[in-house]
Amino acid sequence: MKRQQQARAPKTELKIKQGQRFPLTIKRLGIDGEGVGFFKRQVVFVPGALPGEEVVCEAVKVSQKFATGKVVKLRRKSKDRTTPPCAVYEQCGGCQLQHMTYDAQLREKKDIVRQAFERYTKINLEQLDFHDTIGMDDPWHYRNKSQMQVGMKDGHVIAGLYSSNSHKLIDITDCIVQHPQTNTITKVVKQIADDLNIPIYNERKHRGFLRTIVTRVGFKTGEWQLALVTTTKEFPRKALFLEELRRRLPDVTSVIQNVNKEKTSLIFGDETIVLYGKEKLEERLGDFTFHLSARAFFQLNPVQTEKLYDAAKQAAELTGKENVVDAYCGVGTIGLWVADKAKELRGMDVIDDSINDARKNAAVHGVDHAVYEVGKAETWLPKWEKEGWQADVVIVDPPRTGLDDSLIATLLRTKPSRIVYVSCNPSTLAKNVKDLVKGGYTLKSLQPVDMFPQTAHIENVAVLEIRN
């Protein structure tokens, strides 16, 4: 009977109709960098609009909870609006905020964090240390790695990113947030593939050979690595391709082939072959040198990474007496950064290559009080506890999806004194903090760090302490 009543219940009448035009004042930025306004109490998201602007908006998509619009006319322009320097900014979608001054980006990114906590928690941010965003002195050419999808257009090889909300590949010849060398490498590979008629992968037909051009540059070492992601191990005109590559890029450090046969959006497959040069790239952060395999995770902005890790180290407040866990440790970067202040360091990651790299990185730097294991923190923390080893400080740096529920439950059960949460997603950070606070922790501070200028992404270092 109840189900029948629910079935007969009228749907909420939409106040906005698709195609409708209306005036809108933009109140703030949304988590994806879009302007947010309200029309007849209904929220409207408008890509490209900035806080404080008055626009005439056209509803492009309408749902029960919100509408998405486009700017038809800009009635009042924000003082923070500027001209995007990128030629394909409007088409690419890789950046969302090039049309906003950098000082304004830093201000609004802090507000994005504030919005997430207001939405998902009841925490009063005025009662804790909520710092201003740490920005870059030069917010351009900061990315040390590019992953450009390969395609064909007008009979020629192109490489770039897919346009926002579409599967149209945009050819990118000079991305101004990438290190210039990554752009050079990609251009050369495109040209060689074009000259030699290398078969290019067609995603729709699942045919072709070359799928993705991945480049990584060592900012401090000057080394660079090229990874060619292909559908098969058999490499057509391989000897000629490599000969041309050496001729046009004589300073190459490492050339890798990765085989991904699957019909998937994932970049890398399981099989990796060294075509020539070294297997791994070297990069330095501070006093540390890291050896990076092609698939190993490493922060994309090395300049800001040092600031992020300094913030995490400061947040950990180590005295030399603490057992420290570096969960989601990757190649060991954050853990090694704080190791000199830790009694013992233990880390884990689910990727074998990362753990192998972490062990080698620890050995190279003489960090003999570090232990790294393959697996998840929710497996290792209880195991170590049973063996009599208790974590005092746990540092977590999860993917955008945040902490697994099982890890949150494990943290609440093992009760480390302090959790340093390095986050790349304010929404999942706020949700996870809510659960940790409910389970006995107090949020002490938030430090936003801008790792990706010109985009809507914002990293945070959050500190939680156990309540006595």
Image (cartoon, grey):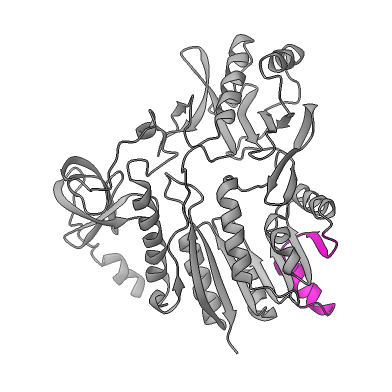
Closer to the camera, 324 or 374?
324
**Dividing the picture into quarters, in which one does residue 266 lie?**
top right
| Residue 402 seen from this side | no
Report x, y in % for residue 425.
49, 58
Quadrant occupied by the N terminus: bottom left
Quadrant occupied by the C terminus: bottom right
Q: Residue at x 69, y 54 (%)?
A: 333
Q: Is residue 278 above or below residue 332?
A: above
How many discs appear? 0
Indicate yes or no whether the magenta region holds residue 116: no
Report x, y in % for residue 452.
49, 47
Report x, y in % for residue 144.
59, 39
Q: Is residue 421 above or below residue 48?
A: below
Q: Residue at x 70, y 79 (%)?
A: 414
**Dividing the picture into quarters, in which one does residue 66 lie?**
bottom left
Q: Is residue 170 left or right of residue 147?
A: left
Closer to the camera, 105 or 396?
105
Indicate yes or no whether the magenta region holds residue 377: yes
Q: Is residue 460 above or below residue 224?
A: below
Closer to the camera, 458 or 366?
366
| Residue 460 seen from this side | yes
Report x, y in % for residue 315.
59, 70
- Give the extent of the magenta segment: 367-390
Closer to the camera, 393 or 305?
305
Q: Is residue 119 left or right of residue 196?
A: left
Q: Is residue 381 left or right of residue 217?
A: right
Q: Residue at x 69, y 59 (%)?
A: 337
